[in-house]
Image: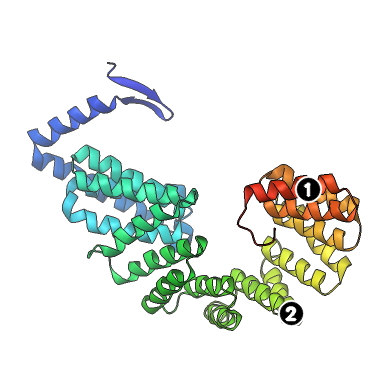
Amino acid sequence: MPFVEERSNGWAYHDVVRMLMLRQKRRSSPHGWTLLHSKLADYHETLLQNLELEPQKAWNDQTWQSYKLNILYHRLCQTPQRSLPQALNEFLAVLKNKRSLARRWAATMIQAGKDTEVGEIQRWGEQLLEGLKAFDEKRHEATVSMLTKLLKDSCIEKKWRSVALNWRGLVYLQSSEYLKAIEDQTEAIKFASDNAEYFNHRGCTYLSMERYPEALQDFDHAIEIDPNFTLSLACRGYTYGIMKRYSEALQDFDRAIEIDPKYISALTGRGETYQRMERYPEALQDFDHAIEIDPKSISVSTGRGNTYRIMERYPEALQDFDHAIEIDPKDTWALTCRGETYLMLCSYNKALADFNQAIELDSNDDWY
């Protein structure tokens, strides 16, 4: 067995060799081990503080992130049991602000657990990492399990419990478990009543439940907290659109686009509102602008395609639907819209082929 192996970031000791060397270091001089990691943690703390970054800028700074992970690793190695509660609370802080860093945080905990041979730290790191991977892969049960385990741990502080509750509520929303989502989101709001994001998430749940007045109330509250919260403005605009309150919808989308001229969701939402109002040239203008910003957006291509279809400009509609399906052959909405267009063109075999493929991909959709 080689003592070293080549990795993406250079040469490193083989894992087994490294473990044996660290074990020897720990056992031969426990005090020296603790002192070394204490000094290294303090050193990285100093480096981090010297950056003097504003809190929101810090989360996106690679150097700051590196120092933060080094502090985590060395504190866990210095005093494993005492540092674990802080590591778990800070994980939720990281999750709230920078999800990609949360995965690295969990991986660092795994490494610290292995290097100290403290199984509890390693297991926590593995559970956190698995929960995050499951979220990306839409394996909702695994993510809920990870968040529930955090919420059951008495070491989690109130301000970070709200993060876990909000995230679990979001997962419940994605899995259409709306009542559970509302319960968690309401509890999160109790802990952090000044958090616009939490009100927005609950508003989205009410929107999914077609409880529009309650959705509007939450979006109103989110916008009161943060008048420049473009996501809530867009969500409220969508809600007004569904309720056929088009003037109010346009006001919200206009405001969101004024804040962020490249905000795709607001441009698409305004385009769809114009479409419902039969103001097709203005709808196409918004969809064209959105496609310039993001040519690979399926929702934008499908939205413009639907506008062309309503205008009976079928070749252009088919071109947009083809583009959307080329990006994602499994997008059932684009397949359905193309099928409807073929139906209007009396191309029945092509229409059936698209409808059948959409049904095969999602047989539970009531539309079919």
Nearest the camera: 359 or 17?
Answer: 359
**Which quadrant is home to the N terminus?**
top left
**Which quadrant is home to the C terminus?**
bottom right
* Residue at the disc numbered 1: 352
Q: Position of residue 349 (x, y in %)?
A: 83, 45
Q: Position of residue 49 (x, y in %)?
A: 35, 56
2 and 1 marks in contact (CB < 8 Å): no
* 2 or 1: tag closer to the N-terminus: 2
Crowding at mark 1 (Cα within 10 Å: few <14, some 14-19, many 20+): some
Label of residue 244 in the image: 2
Nearest the camera: 180 or 258?
Answer: 180
Which amino acid, mark 1? Leu
Name the residue: 48% across, 54% down.
60
Here the colouring is: rainbow
Examine the image and state in which quarter residue 186 appears: bottom left
- Residue 83 visible (yes or no): yes
Q: Position of residue 147 (x, y in %)?
A: 35, 59
- Residue 323 visible (yes or no): no
* C-alpha distance separating marks 2 and 1: 32 Å
Q: Identify the element where label 2 is drawn.
A: loop
Examine the image and state in which quarter residue 188 appears: bottom left
Name the residue: 43% across, 63% down.
167
Name the residue: 55% across, 82% down.
214
Q: Identify the element where label 1 is drawn.
A: helix
Which amino acid, mark 2? Lys
Name the residue: 71% across, 56% down.
299
Above-or-below relation of 45 to 10? below
Q: Is residue 266 left or right of residue 171?
A: right
Nearest the camera: 99 or 300?
Answer: 300
Label of residue 72 in the image: none
